[in-house]
């Protein structure tokens, strides 16, 4: 097997980052070629996802927090994220053919040993952006986390991000009347309107969010898909209509604070208004959801790509050495859609 003489490389955490990520937080390490044991596959990775959640997992105190759906990273650990690759060898008792294309959770390395139950068989020509992207997370949030209704005015925070860029488009296709997103600057805002179909975009760091949002949603907001927290969540809730539904997926304002990124995301809400307006607030993790809903998502994805021009926005970088920079750039807000590395 050619793979036995090849070298393997993987990206490891060298220290727990403080504030904005730096190149020194990571090292690309040479390692012996891994060997698949019984029931395992050796996969040559071709694509993997770079998620800002990795910043959260690398946080020193991530290990003390229960309920984070990703394993925390210790110093020396190899980073991990969803990946697609080709099976180049199999261990005893594993009957998947060499050459199969699989998806699995061990990106950030050239070669991965994967226990067969953790590998999902894909078509050889599978679109990496469809499988590694966050369309499912967005769809699950809008159909399982809360229920979107025809004509709803929807606000998606971090609307140009991996989940947000899909959530805005999917909300429209599920019947939303008006979809508003948030981002950091004018270029992304223009792209969101033109490419993703947002009706309006508000920007952080400029005029008060509440004023921009009141202008963008003069009738108020029915559905909030929140990845940011802080000022954006508070502003959206203060403009919520009776019966509004809010699904909270993340807290980027805390996770990516360049001065003191952390795991606490306090926000001041008017709980009286939540009672009076009958607002639903739900924290949500897409991994909880049932396979029926996932099958429905795959069906919609195919139909919307065929008929409705659903975009799968992604930023692609080449080579393992580019991956740490990709993560830094994603966290700094300089990339769009899901971030993928090709090997
Ligand atoms: N619940 C689930 O099932 C689930 C699954 C995966 C991820 N998550 C979580 O969901 C959230 C979104 O994940 P994602 O992968 O889609 O991330 P993302 O939105 O792609 O995150 C990157 C974007 O965050 C924005 N950003 C950067 N610094 C910020 C700050 N200080 N305040 C506010 N926004 C900032 C930037 O966008 P702009 O420049 O456009 O502002 C940047 O491009 C994260 O909290 C993640 O941990 C949840």
Image: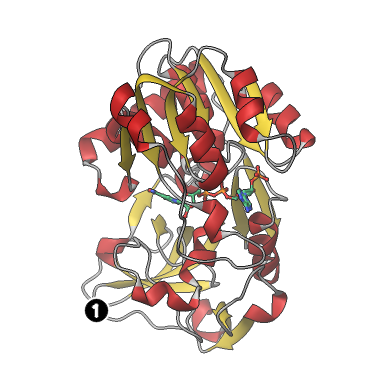
User: Is residue 190 visible from the viewing direction of this image?
Assistant: yes
Q: Quadrant of residue 270?
A: top left
Looking at this rendering, what residue extends furthest in the right direction?
Answer: 187
User: Is residue 297 visible from the viewing direction of this image?
Assistant: no
Residue 101 lies left or right of residue 277; in this view the side is right
The residue wearing badge 1 is 38
- Under circle 1, the secondary element is loop
Q: Position of residue 331 (x, y in %)?
A: 64, 58
Position above or below: 103 against 312: below
Q: Quadrant of residue 14?
A: bottom right
Q: Which residue is at a point 60% across and 68% down the rendered structure image?
A: 260
Residue 70 lies left or right of residue 154; in this view the side is left
Q: Badge 1 local density, few (<14 within 10 Å), some, or many (20+)? A: few
Looking at this rendering, what residue extends furthest in the front direction?
Answer: 272
Q: Nearer the viewer, residue 79 or 202?
A: 202
Q: Nearer the viewer, residue 97 or 320?
A: 320
Q: Which residue is at a point 70% across and 22% down the rendered structure image?
A: 194
Q: Position of residue 143 (x, y in %)?
A: 31, 29
Q: Position of residue 290 (x, y in %)?
A: 21, 41
Looking at this rendering, what residue extends furthest in the bottom direction?
Answer: 32
């Amino acid at each position: 097997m050619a793979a036995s003489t090849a070298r393997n490389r993987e990206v490891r955490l060298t220290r727990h980052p403080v504030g904005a990520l730096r190149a020194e937080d990571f090292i690309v390490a040479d390692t012996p070629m891994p060997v698949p044991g019984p029931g395992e596959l050796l996969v040559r990775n071709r694509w993997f996802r770079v998620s800002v959640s990795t910043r959260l997992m690398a946080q020193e105190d991530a290990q003390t927090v229960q309920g984070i759906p990703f394993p925390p990273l210790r110093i020396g650990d190899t980073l991990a994220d969803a990946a697609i690759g080709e099976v180049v060898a199999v261990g005893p008792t594993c009957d998947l053919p060499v050459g199969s294309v699989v998806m699995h959770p061990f990106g950030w390395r050239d070669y991965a040993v994967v226990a067969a139950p953790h590998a999902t068989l894909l078509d050889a020509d599978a679109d990496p952006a469809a499988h590694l992207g966050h369309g499912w997370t967005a769809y699950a949030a809008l159909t399982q986390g809360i229920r979107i209704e025809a004509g709803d005015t929807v606000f998606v925070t971090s609307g140009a991000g991996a989940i947000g860029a899909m959530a805005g488009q999917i909300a429209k296709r599920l019947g939303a009347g008006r979809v508003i997103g948030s981002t950091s600057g004018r270029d992304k805002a223009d792209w969101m309107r033109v490419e993703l179909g947002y009706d309006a975009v508000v920007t952080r760091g400029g005029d008060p969010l509440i004023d921009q949002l009141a202008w963008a949603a003069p009738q108020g907001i029915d559905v909030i898909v929140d990845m940011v927290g802080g000022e954006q969540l508070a502003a959206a809730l203060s403009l919520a209509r009776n019966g509004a539904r809010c699904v909270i997926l993340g807290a980027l304002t805390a996770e990516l604070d360049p001065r003191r990124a952390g795991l606490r995301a306090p926000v001041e809400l008017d709980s009286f208004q939540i009672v009076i307006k009958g607002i639903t607030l739900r924290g949500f993790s897409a991994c909880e959801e049932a396979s029926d809903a996932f099958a429905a998502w795959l069906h919609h994805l195919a139909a919307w790509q065929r008929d409705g021009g659903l975009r799968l926005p992604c930023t692609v970088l080449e080579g393992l050495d580019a991956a740490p920079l990709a993560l830094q750039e994603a966290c700094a807000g300089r990339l769009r859609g899901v971030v993928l590395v090709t090997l």
